[in-house]
Image (cartoon, coloured by chain):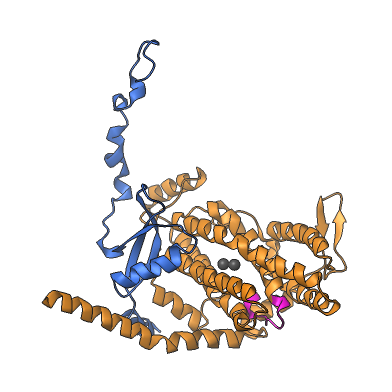
Chain colours: A orange, B blue
Amino acid sequence: MSNSFQEHFDRLIDSEVTIEPKDWMPDDYRKTLIRQISQHAHSEIVGMLPEGNWITRAPSLRRKAVLLAKVQDEAGHGLYLYSAAETLGVTRDELYNQLHTGKAKYSSIFNYPTLTWADMGAVGWLVDGAAIMNQVPLCRTSYGPYARAMVRVCKEESFHQRQGFEIMLTLSKGTEIQKKMAQDAFNRWWWPSLMMFGPPDAESPHTAQSVRWRIKRLTNDELRQKFVDVTVEQAKVLGLEMPDKDIKWNEERGHHDFGAINWEEFRNVVKGNGPCNKQRLETRKKAWDEGQWVRDAAMAHAEKRKSRKKAA
Amino acid sequence: MTQEIKKTNKTEWPLWEVFIRSKAGLDHKHAGSLHAADAQMAVENARDVYTRRMEGVSIWVVESRHIHASDPDQSESMYEPANDKIYRHPTFYNLPEEVKYM
Ligand SMILES: [Fe+2]
Ligand SMILES: [Fe+2]
C-alpha cells in the first residue's frame, strides 16, 4: 500500500509534476521541506535586523524610502515562506518557537554587523545577489506552495540588489573616503557571502536526495561559482578590487578560480559564535515578547466585535 | 517545550486565504495566506503584504478552515470521466472549408 503511494510520488517527481499540500508525500520529504522553508523564512525575518539598523541614518530621504521598502519586502518574504511551511502541517507559533529557542537556524550571514552606510550597499549587492542566485532555481521546485512563494519573492528581490549596487556605485564614484568605505564593506561581506551557498558539495551528504526531489536544483558549489563569475564583472564596473588575491580566470574551466574559504569561521558562526548571533536572537525575542499584548488585544477586540455583532 | 507551544498556540491568530483581483474585469485569484485576528485585519494585512506593487484592485479574504477541497486521491474518479467526451470540444466537429467563422 505505502509502496504504491511511494511509487506514485516518485513518478510525479520524476515527471516534473508539482506536489500539492494534500498529496501523499514521504515523511522525509515533508520534514526536509519544513526545515528548508522555515530556515529560509527565519532568514528573511532576521535579515531585517542588520538593515533596519540603518533606516533612521540613511543619508537622504530617497535612500531612506528605498531601504524602508526593502526591509518591508523582507518581512513579506518571511510571511510567504512561513505560509508555505504551514501548508505542510506545522503551525506558525511552532516555527517561531523553534527560531526563538535556537532550535532552528537562519542564514549565518545575518550574524555579521553592518558598520557603515556602505554596508547597506554591500548587503544589497552581495547578500541579496547571492540570495537571488539561490532562489531563482527554486521557483521551479517540486512543492507547489514553496515554488509559488519563491516566484513572488524573486519578483521583489531584483530591486534589492539594484539599490545596493547603486549605493556602491555612488560611493565608489565619490570622494576618496567614500570609495574606501565601499571597498571596506566589500572586503568584509565578500567571504561571508560566499559561505551563504553552504558547505562544499563534498560535505553536503543530502544534496543528491534534494536534487532528486527538486527542492534543490543546483549544488552549493555550482551556485557559488556562478556568483563568483558574475561578481568579478560587476566589481570591475564599480572600480573596486576583489577581496581575494587568488581570483583568476581559468580558461580551461571557463570559470574564475578563487581562494580557499574559511569554513572554520562558517561553522563557528553557525554554532552561535558569530559577532552578532546573540544580539540578533535577543532583538528578535524582545520584539516578539513585547508584541504579545498587541496580539492579545487584537484577539480580544475581534472577540468583542463578534459578540457585539451577534447581540445586535 | 510542548507546554510552551500549547501556551502560544492558544493565542495564534486564525489563518486566512487571500484572493486578489489584479485588475478590473478579471476574477479573483488565490494570492497566498496570512494570519489575522479578524476579517477586517485580514483585508488590511493582505493589502500590505500582497499589493505593495499595485498587484490588486480588490481583495477577498476567507478563513482557511472554511475552505473545502477535493481529495487528490480521488482524482481519477473525479476527472477521468471527462476524458472520453471529446465531443464537448469544438474541434470534434468537421466543417466544410467554406464555413469560415464558426
Ligand atoms: Fe528577501
Ligand atoms: Fe532581499
Displayed-image quarter of ligand 1:
bottom right
Please name the residue shown 45% across and 57% down the image.
B55
Q: Quadrant of residue B7?
A: bottom left
**Res. B82 visible in picture:** yes
Residue A263, image x and y in percent?
Answer: 73, 73
Q: Which residues are magenta?
A: A109-119
Please name the residue shown 33% across and 49% down the image.
B72
**Res. A214 visible in picture:** no
Residue A247, image x and y in percent?
Answer: 85, 63
Q: Quadrant of residue A159?
A: bottom right
Which one is in front, A245 or A269? A245
Q: How many marks?
A: 0
Q: Is residue B56 left or right of residue A232?
A: left
Residue A192, image x and y in percent?
Answer: 71, 73
Looking at the rendered image, the quarter that the C terminus of chain A falls into is bottom left
Relative to A274, residue A86 above or below? above
Which one is in front, A156 or A60? A60
Relative to A266, residue A250 above or below? above
Q: Quadrant of residue A244?
A: bottom right
Q: Residue furthest front?
A: A61
